[in-house]
Image (cartoon, helix red, strand yellow):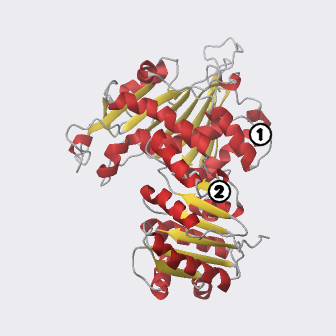
Amino acid sequence: MVSEIKTLVTFFGGTGDLAKRKLYPSVFNLYKKGYLQKHFAIVGTARQALNDDEFKQLVRDSIKDFTDDQAQAEAFIEHFSYRAHDVTDAASYAVLKEAIEEAADKFDIDGNRIFYMSVAPRFFGTIAKYLKSEGLLADTGYNRLMIEKPFGTSYDTAAELQNDLENAFDDNQLFRIDHYLGKEMVQNIAALRFGNPIFDAAWNKDYIKNVQVTLSEVLGVEERAGYYDTAGALLDMIQNHTMQIVGWLAMEKPESFTDKDIRAAKNAAFNALKIYDEAEVNKYFVRAQYGAGDSADFKPYLEELDVPADSKNNTFIAGELQFDLPRWEGVPFYVRSGKRLTAKQTRVDIVFKAGTFNFGSEQEAQEAVLSIIIDPKGAIELKLNAKSVEDAFNTRTIDLGWTVSDEDKKNTPEPYERMIHDTMNGDGSNFADWNGVSIAWKFVDAISAVYTANKAPLETYKSGSMGPEASDKLLAANGDTWVFEG
């Protein structure tokens, strides 16, 4: 039996694509499940001039594919209102304040306000400042701010943004969204690690040979060259999504499964992450750019629309992370992400050390591997050693596997639904805190500085492959290979 959550959410960028595709359907799912009942309100705001009826129609259209009961949908939509608003104009906040207070009175919501920023990052600090100075924060209950990525473009810009936000909100009121942390199979990492003594006891240097995180995409830059050429795989995928997944893998065991203790455990790992100098960047990281492929549709990156002809942007990154912790001494964490690769897949592979027992046979025991497939369809696979069917006592590897069923997938909350729900509950377990964000930026900035100065090779790789040969050599230097081959 779920309990009703009383809250008022203001969506900045309330007429945008994200709001229509993800946010309003997510809130509707929370309503259908009973988390939202009578005492909630949604206020949308953007520059677009709409009245309440026009805005409600926008919401109606956005949830139509999720509507089984039209009367239920209409009851939900009655909790929505809208005000056009210029986020850069202090005087304009009086109009928004009036709408929020009207909605709070109408639905009997005493405090408990969430402000969701689905706008360009350059407006985050401005909005936060005016929310406080113009009196839009509640005097009772809670005030929370949800922020879409990117959180800065470097450590310096992220720190500046953090300072701006902390003028109005404490860090524990800030909920930085990385939707990968809302994915069901990312959350399964904790269940597998801490829910099974067989893995809990072996999650360390004594049993694990290496850890691999792969985020591979088959698409090229498409129509995003304007943004992507300034970010590349390093900033677009490694600094945020990949590092947050690594946090769950490298963290110490938390004292309890509360957001405070989970963040403390992650931060113990993040704070032990080695920051590389120029020589180490070249030793432990590979950058590359996709070239042509076998298909005529696979253009080289430099021939893509709006890509500068002399671009040195990385469309592929592979690297080794090292943690100065007793738990992980000598254990490499390999990460890679790229476009135009063989297959689309997000996955974690935990490679365990091969057994040392000598069976006296030609085929000795191989490395066992635990794989967590995050996308496109969730699965858990375990590769183990067993006896082969022969007269001689040789070993072979066998596969044990589980795949998310269609029924489970249907019942799994979407990442945005989960993250909005967690914010309403004040649960920051699946959100990045400032310490984790700042360490990720310091780590990535050290790599970016080498690339910006063009002091590292820029490899090329064939579109439709799993990246450049240098990526394989990176692991081979430690006697390792990539588990996922596409």
Q: Quadrant of the C terminus?
A: top left
Residue 338 visible in this rendered orientation of the protein: no
Q: Nearer the viewer, residue 423 or 333?
A: 423
Residue 135, position in %: x, y?
Answer: 59, 70
> Is 176 left or right of 206, judged from the image as shown?
left
Identified at 57% across, 61% down, the residue is 416
Determine which residue is flagged by label 2: 173
**Can you give x and y, in whole percent of width and height, for residue 309 in the image?**
19, 40
Residue in front for this viewpoint, 66 or 408: 66
Please state, as top left, top right, bottom left or bottom right, where the N terminus lies in the image.
bottom right
* Drawn side of residue 34 relative to residue 437, left or right: right
Where is residue 192 drawn, in percent x and y? 71, 42
Relative to 37, residue 257 above or below:
above
Nearer to us in this view, 179 or 395: 179
Secondary structure beneath disc 1? loop
Which class describes the residues within 10 Å of circle 1: few (<14), some (14-19), or many (20+)? few
Residue 385, given in percent of the width and then of the height, sits at 66, 27
**Amino acid type of the residue tagged 1 in the rendering:** Asn
In the image, what residue type sits under mark 2? Gln
Residue identified by numbered label 1: 196
- Mark 2, Cα crowd under 10 Å, few <14 / some 14-19 / many 20+, is some
Q: Nearer the viewer, mark 2 or mark 1?
A: 2
Residue 312 falls left or right of residue 73: left
Name the disc covering residue 154, or none: none
Q: Tell me where residue 29 sits by quadrant.
A: bottom right
Q: Is residue 325 visible?
A: yes
Residue drawn at point x = 62 percent, y = 53 percent:
184
